[in-house]
Amino acid sequence: MSDSASAFAPASIGNVAVGFDMLGLALAGVGDRVTARRTREEGITIAEVRGLDGEIHPYLSTDPTQNTASIAAKALWDAYGNGGGVQLDVHKGVPLQSGMGSSAASAVAATVAVNALLENPLEPERLLPYALEGEKFASRGVHADNVAPSLLGGLILCPSVLLPEVIRLRVPPGISAVLMHPELQVNTAHARRGLAKGYSMEQWLQQQGYLAAFIAACASGDTTLIGRSLRDVVIEPQRSAAVPCFDAVKEAAGRAGALGCSLSGSGPSIFALCEDRKAQNIASTMEQACRSLGIECQSWVSSMHADGARLEG
């Protein structure tokens, strides 16, 4: 058994437009890091939480009952720890309330780090229920569309009716994900409460059709069908007004050749899928559209095969 371990967990794109609460995609290049150390004292503690600038985070709590990292770590340690406790250092790389799976990345990184301290570490797939405990605290529900891809990588189908089982989907070669994060915040829990409680049969059937077609298109590598099916007719219309740059960015991505563009999770981040050769130009075009409205932003380009969480050091 190790006395300490550090893990990195990537950001993620929740919903992927067509699969509300049941489809997620790992995003390379940005994520959270958590270091876990064994202690003689029982229980889970947090030594510090640092932000994007490397300084002590001004908002996130070190109270172990109020942080997704410690809540997830406690769930795993309570189940498999063999005495003593664990102290965590949390280093945020994912902006808060960004639609990039920030709370999920912390929960996953902590779970993977603590797992390495166990006498008999679990396989990654078996860690999902424990990481979900942390995410449940943040989103007030059990939704794996950020946790599962952050933990396992790639494109993951994870409807709640199948949990803890998830399905890793095939993804076509030559397709990239572009994610642009405007300097705005959207609270996921608040965004969920604002959604309509009922939908028409026509809306339900239309969205189910797009989801089925998108999964089939990814499996067959049919990029034309990806472009036809990467649509959200239920959730996006309700949430896009909360992101002032959304319409301009989506239009710009389409003009630049994106296969499709939508909100990442509840926003404000916006993602597009596109051919690899167009990705950098589409990222620049999306940024320009955002900045033209006076909103600062940054972007990342990621393979649809991005890796999930990993131990470091």
Image (cartoon, rainbow, N blue to C red):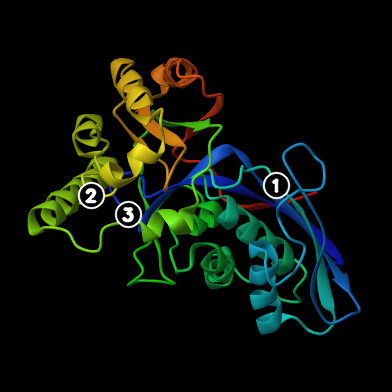
Q: Pick whichever, 206 or 1, lies toward us.
A: 206
The image quarter in which residue 122 lies: bottom right
How many residues crowd around disc 2 within 10 Å: few (fewer than 14), some, or many (20 or more)? Answer: some
The residue singled out by tag 1 in the image is 92
Q: Is residue 105 left or right of residue 33?
A: left
Under tag 1, what secondary structure?
loop
Tag 2: amino acid: Val
The image quarter in which residue 151 lies: bottom right
Residue 135: x and y in percent read 54, 64
The image quarter in which residue 261 lies: top left
Q: Is residue 57 left or right of residue 215?
A: right
Residue drawn at x 29%, y 46% is 238
Q: Pick whichever, 27 or 221, lies toward us.
A: 27
Q: CA distance from mark 3 to mark 2?
A: 9 Å
- Going from the N terminus, do you reach mark 1 or mark 2 first? 1
Confirm whether residue 154 shows in the render.
Answer: yes
Tag 3: amino acid: Phe
- Going from the N terminus, do you reach mark 3 or mark 2 first? 3
Q: Nearer the viewer, mark 1 or mark 2?
A: 2
Residue 190 image label: none
Tag 1: amino acid: Lys
Residue 234 image label: 2
